[in-house]
Amino acid sequence: MENRRQFASLIGPPSLYLFLLFLLPVGLMFVYSFRAGITGPAHDVFTLDNYRSFLTNSHFHRLFWRSALISLTISVISSLLAYPLAYYLVFQAGRNRVTLMTLLIIPAWTSYLLRIFAWKLILGSSGLLNSLLLSLGVIEKASPMLIYSRSAVIVTLVYVWVPFVALPIFAALGRIDRNLLEAAADLGCKPWEAFLRVTLPLSLPGVAAGFFFAFIPTLGEFVTPLLVGGASGQMYGNLIQDQFMRALNWPMGSVMSLAMLVAVITLVFILTRLASVSDLGGVYE
Amino acid sequence: MNKHKIFSPGSIYFLLMCVLLYLPILLLIIFSFNDSTRLVFPLKGFTLQWYGKLYENRELLKALGNSLMIGFGSSLIATILGTMGAIAIVRFKLPGRSVFLAVSALPLVIPYVIFGVSLLILFNEVGIRLSAFAAGLAHVIISIPYALLIISSRLVGFPDNLEEAAMDLGASYWGALLKVTIPICSPALLAAFLLCFTISFDEYAIASFIVGTDATLPVYLFSQLRFPTRLPMVVALAAVLMIVTMAVMLFTEWLRRVGQSPAKKG
């Protein structure tokens, strides 16, 4: 009994805070998704129209799938770039591996907004990359193609996420029992065979964790598209932001946010099935 | 076993990626000293004038004040709530534990745009004015999971019989927490505080929805991007922030490692 009281008084305040400023707002958003409007009499009219127009509006769907595709591209490229990094650190870097991993992750600790901002300067049409190529004589005319495009969003976000994707892969590779690789060699496996049949399969939970590490947050991105995306680089998050800040159609925005919330929570659920929890904690190992 | 060659395909690839990862940051720093209003190669010459302009900019100083204030407030609250939550989930295996863990970890994965708009709805509904204070309230939520992780991994690292010993010697449960548990966790508490502070200090997405007219530093910085003439000053500001956050995070990481290896500290 004493135990329970102590537990309750410890867990009470943080639970209350989480309830009031996290669960309650999401619940209110659910209520808003049924409202006909946010001012005047429409505020108190409840309807399913928002859901109906969300389901039938092909513009929303296009943007939703386009965002998903952008996130998918970012996560695939990040995983492909991160895997050799993690592999090198675990199997070839020897005793320095943790120091080198830290070296890799330090830039990712600095301001997220500023790293994106840096890419805006690099890719800009009168920006660093263009002016560098011009002054080296590689190109004759500044190319406006570098910024305000889908590729600019992808390049920038791959830059942001590669170190984070490398972490869980690093953790998964580090746990592989080296005896298994020796056994494979003793049984006549060539190194690449051993890699394909032992190392790679055993590291897949880490790859899955890394993949979702990048996929889930980029799905909700709206700042990077604002800075470097231009019209063709817009993502679903920008649509939500628009509904709240410009179109002032909060009920519609609520429906769109809830759709994304459901998608994200489903993905997280799949992730917790695919990868071990200790891989997810890779950031803190 | 592989020999550790200095130049192998792996190490060259690693080096290349490191250069790529540091290059954008380095460019920001280099161009903050460039004597030109345009951010293009070739470099024009060395100047400190952009840093000088930072000092004179009152709007910026006000935004800095807002950011420091909500950073301090939100990380203090997040650290306190995180400590309570961490003790509860590490020391007690009671029902409610796993629900709490799941709910408190959710802010790690939910897109910030959703937090931003749902809090916009909440504050509108209950009549809290959009302000830096409102953004501070929001930052507590996104900081709690990090505080929980850091502090609970420290708590796992030492046995609870230290608390029991204190209670055998006459301390009350809360007395034992205050006199034994909290001091042992202090490096982790400081690490949690600093990490939460960095998170709040850097946070743009949620703040952009709910700060109203009290711009925080990231919100201010973002708003300045529309004015090409102010770009060099923004770059100088960015360079300062980069270096400060990097230093704070390095110190935090060091603290966290100290806090996690009780063996070293006896």
Image (tube, coloured by chain):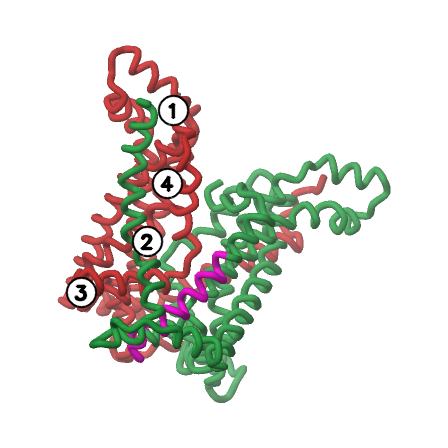
Residue A96 vs B8, above or below: the answer is above
Instruction: Name the mark on residue B265.
Output: 1
| Residue B85 is inside the magenta segment | no
Instruction: Name the mark on residue B214.
Output: 3
What is the chain identity of the residue bearing mark 3?
A: B
Q: Are discs 2 and 4 both within one chain?
A: no
Identify which amino acid the numbered label 3 is placed on: Asp
Q: Secondary structure at mark 2?
A: helix
Residue A67 vs A280, above or below: the answer is below
**Pointer 4: what residue?**
B148
Query: Which circle's residue, 1 or 4, is located before the other in the chain?
Result: 4
Q: Residues within 10 Å of mark 4 (few under 14, many from 20)?
A: many
Answer with the quarter of the image where residue B235 lies. bottom left
**Pointer 2: what residue?**
A22
Identify which amino acid the numbered label 2 is placed on: Phe
Distance in Å between CA atoms under marks 1 and 2: 38 Å
- A67 or B1: nearer the viewer: A67
Q: Residues within 10 Å of mark 2 (few under 14, many from 20)?
A: many
Chain A, which colour? green
What percent of the width, then of the height, locates residue A22?
32, 53
The answer to whether residue B231 of the structure is visible from this angle is: no
Answer with the quarter of the image where residue A181 lies. top right
| Residue drawn 35% across the image and 42% down it | B147
Residues drawn in magenta: A244-265
